[in-house]
Image: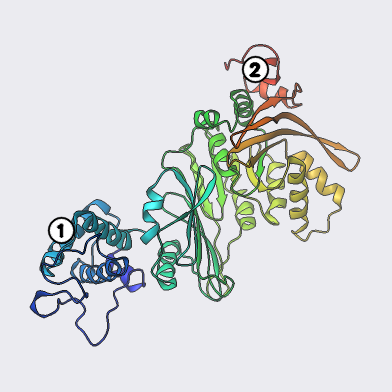
Amino acid sequence: MSLLKRIEQGQTDTSAPADQKPFAPAPGGTSRLSGLTARRPAPPGGASGSRIVELKNEVQNRLLAELDPSMDVTQTAEVRRQIEELFEGILTEMNIVLSRPERRRLFEQIVAEILGLGPIEPLLADESITEVMVNGAKNIFIEREGKIHREAASFESDDHLMRIIDRIVAPLGRRIDESSPYVDARLNDGSRVNAVIPPISLVGPVLTIRKFARNPISVEMLIEKGTITAESIEFLKASVIARVNMVISGGTGSGKTTMLNVLSQYIPADERIVTIENAAELQLRQEHVVTLESRPPNIEGRGEVTIQNLVVNSLRMRPDRIIVGEIRDEAALDMLQAMNTGHEGSMTTAHSNSPRDTLSRIETMTLMAGMDLPTRAIREQIASALELVCHLERMRDGTRKVTHISEIQGMEGDVITMTDIFVFEQTGLENGKVIGRLRPTGLRPRFMEKIEQSGIHLPASIFGVGERSIYR
């Protein structure tokens, strides 16, 4: 998108009072900013925060006036070089003297405003931060190592924050206004974005960004962090290759999408995969992947494409596997139908408190489809379609751990029967850290024959006894 187009969409602030020439320095070569006069050094301790904000706005406005409007802002390195050249020239022309740190900070803030997401751009660049939460213009919080901390950075105003939100959602063809005051979106790197604005938010615009690591999390990293064990990963890998239908469940921020990404790498490269999401964030590495994304209604209330619509349509696309980013409504019925009609090895995620609750939620969501089905028929569909539940939890110390890997065995009367294959056993709490391990229960799943038919032989050691397995 050209720079001119972004300005026209209100994504950068180029406003200036109507009674003055916006980009001309004051007579005599003096800046219009009080206290920053020609060749006057910055006061001891650096320029004040308010002066930096005023200076940023003035230099930014002048930069936008001098930059080539047809410039392609996707060429970040080239645009950054041109901005830096103009920036240095403008400061010299305006006879503004700043210390080296202030000059660098001012430049980075302006670049973030033109090319990035303003005050939160440095937070998104910090790989130790996993979530950024903005509660109105002046309150920014981050999550680091599972703990929430307050940041000193802030937006200038609610309008400033709204421009950043618009910058995120506009390229995706989505909108956020009083008639549609919340939206799900994503950044270019796949990071998940949710925004809520007044009137339903009483604290001003609220922006939540769940970051995706630049380098996708690997199995080795999960094992090193204690999220899962090598034995249980070996079992899950065999289950994916053997085309076992799977649900990954857990609470908000427990790591469901990360686990889905990790397990999806074991899908054979010769299979056709269709992914369905509200905002595309899965990072599959296979070559033959079709990515579908739902669409909200337009301003006239038309054109909506739901997850359910996409699941139904995907059945006509000759998929080997269907991966749904998250099941949260009546699309659960269509997902179960897909799993029951030859699309084995399909996977999805769902919010729940435990493996048993996962089945109850899926049952409830199936009822939302409006079909007048008896409860037993729905449970038979669930028991027939689903084979494995991998459940994660965010522990009190902020770490994410797989707590259950459970097999769905079938029906006994009107009850779906489940068996835990692996269960997390907490042995203590040291210095605020949860101590424990995901241990096998000694039981083997009923679908072991399915795994062996795929050429994978898991010895008893995986389930608690004997030596480690060897893949053939």
Residue found 62% across the figure and 19% down from its top? 455
Is 14 positioned to the left or the right of 171 in the image? left
> Extreme front residue here?
44
Is 369 positioned to the left or the right of 417 in the image? left
Q: Position of residue 330 (x, y in %)?
A: 71, 57
Badge 2 amino acid: His
Is 187 positioned to the left or the right of 59 in the image? right
Image quadrant of residue 434?
Answer: top right
Q: Label 1's element? A: helix
Tell me how many marks there are: 2
- The residue where tag 2 is placed is 457
Q: How many neighbours does mark 2 have within 10 angstroms: few (below 14), some (14-19), or many (20 or more)?
A: some
Q: Position of residue 310 (x, y in %)?
A: 60, 54
The answer to whether the residues at label 1 and label 2 have Cβ atoms under 8 Å apart is: no
Image quadrant of residue 425?
Answer: top right
Badge 1 amino acid: Glu
Choose the circle earlier in sequence order: 1 or 2.
Answer: 1
> Extreme top residue here?
466
- Image quarter in which the N terminus is found: bottom left
Q: Position of residue 299 (x, y in %)?
A: 53, 75
**Residue 85 image label:** 1
**Residue 196 image label:** none
- Image quarter in which the C terminus is found: top right
Residue found 63% across the figure and 44% down from its top? 348
Residue found 61% across the figure and 16% down from its top? 469
Instruction: Give whichever of 316, 325 is nearer the camera.
Output: 325
Q: Label 2's element? A: loop
Instruction: Give whichever of 70, 93 is nearer the camera.
Output: 93
Mark 1 to mark 2 CA distance (whole Å): 63 Å
Q: How many neighbours does mark 1 have within 10 angstroms: few (below 14), some (14-19), or many (20 or more)?
A: few
